[in-house]
Image (cartoon, rainbow, N blue to C red):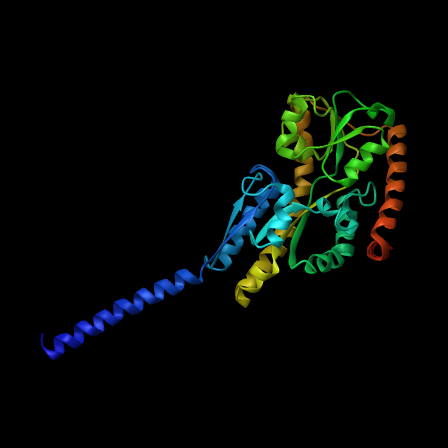
Amino acid sequence: MTAKTFASASLASLGVAAASLTLATSAQAATEWDMPTPYGDRTFHTVNIREFADDVREATDGELDITVHSNGSLIDHAEIKNSVRRGIVPAGELIMSRLANENPIFEVDSVPYLAANYEDAWTLWEASREIIGEELEKQGLRLLFAVPWPPQGIYTQDKIEKIEDLRNLKMRAYNTSSERLASLANAVPTQIEVPDIPTAFSTGRVDAMVTSPATGADTKAWDYLSHFNHAQLWLPKNMVIVSERAFSRLDETTQQAVLEAATTAEQRGWDMSRQETQDALATLKENGITVSEPSPELAKALQDIGSMMTEEWVDRAGPQGMQILQNYRDAKE
């Protein structure tokens, strides 16, 4: 081999090595996140989160690739928050009020009639977002965004006209507020996750439930009950959180892309929730569910329960709760 040939071959080898190093470095730069969510693929929350993941992927040219694991398939709902905190997964979605046993401020959106329409629910969220975010920061978590479910109502086998109609019914509950509501109505609260609702009714574990029109439509409530009272008790939110450690490992450009996608997802999610309310109510009616509004007698009883639960919440939530309530009242004036 001549010196010229050897030099050319060496340069070619260096070029291949450099290209391989570039590809390896690029591959190492890409970050993959697994993100568990509790609800099925048809649920608008899941649809919105998949769009969030797509937005992040597009904005970062694939440098951050978020894989959404829906319907509790990766991690059970009850374990999602702690799994993010412990670094098992970098991000996840959960219903905010599930954390009420840690701190009552997390159930501010589930106090009956404190905020029972979308305008008030948004005002309440703005009044509580910073305090809730600070509480999560203490645990090494970052709040990305939150989206409400449609207003909660009461599903039963028979039409309810008064609060006594709920007495002794086994009522599906999903947070401390729905448990307390059931107890104050002299029903029997029973914890059931959304994927288990149809089976719970078919096996007699529950007779009624407090949940949204969307959940009723998604779980085909017409297969196991016949009435929905559109009581519009509260609008509970799902929130998306990320480990601060995982977030801090992203470069500044990628962090900004995540935050911008989160802002977009929150706005889109609230719009989707409003539309879902109308669509789900229509679906319930089309499939034979009798949809009604509370009678004056039932409405008064539920309002009385709401007033009692508001006082209880303020007592439990302490100074943080008082600050949220003051922020909310100031914003509404």
Closest to the observer, 322 or 264:
322
Which residue is rendered at x = 66% and y = 26% of the image? 200
Residue 32: x and y in percent read 48, 54
Q: Is residue 185 left or right of residue 84?
A: right
Answer above or below: position of 45 versus 154. Answer: below
Answer above or below: position of 101 versus 172. Answer: below
Image quadrant of residue 85? bottom right
Q: Is residue 75 left or right of residue 99?
A: left
Residue 260: x and y in percent read 59, 59
Kindly tell me whether residue 121 is visible in this rendering.
yes
Kindly tell me whether residue 232 is visible in this rendering.
no
Residue 89: x and y in percent read 55, 51
Q: Is residue 53 left or right of residue 148?
A: left
Outermost residue toward the bottom in this view: 3
Image quadrant of residue 87? bottom right
Residue 314: x and y in percent read 86, 50
Which quarter shows the C terminus?
bottom right
Which residue is rendered at x = 78% and y = 56% of the image? 127
Answer above or below: position of 26 versus 296. Answer: below
Answer above or below: position of 29 versus 238. Answer: below
Which residue is rendered at x = 51% and y = 51% of the image? 54
Which quarter shows the N terminus?
bottom left
Closest to the observer, 161 or 84:
84
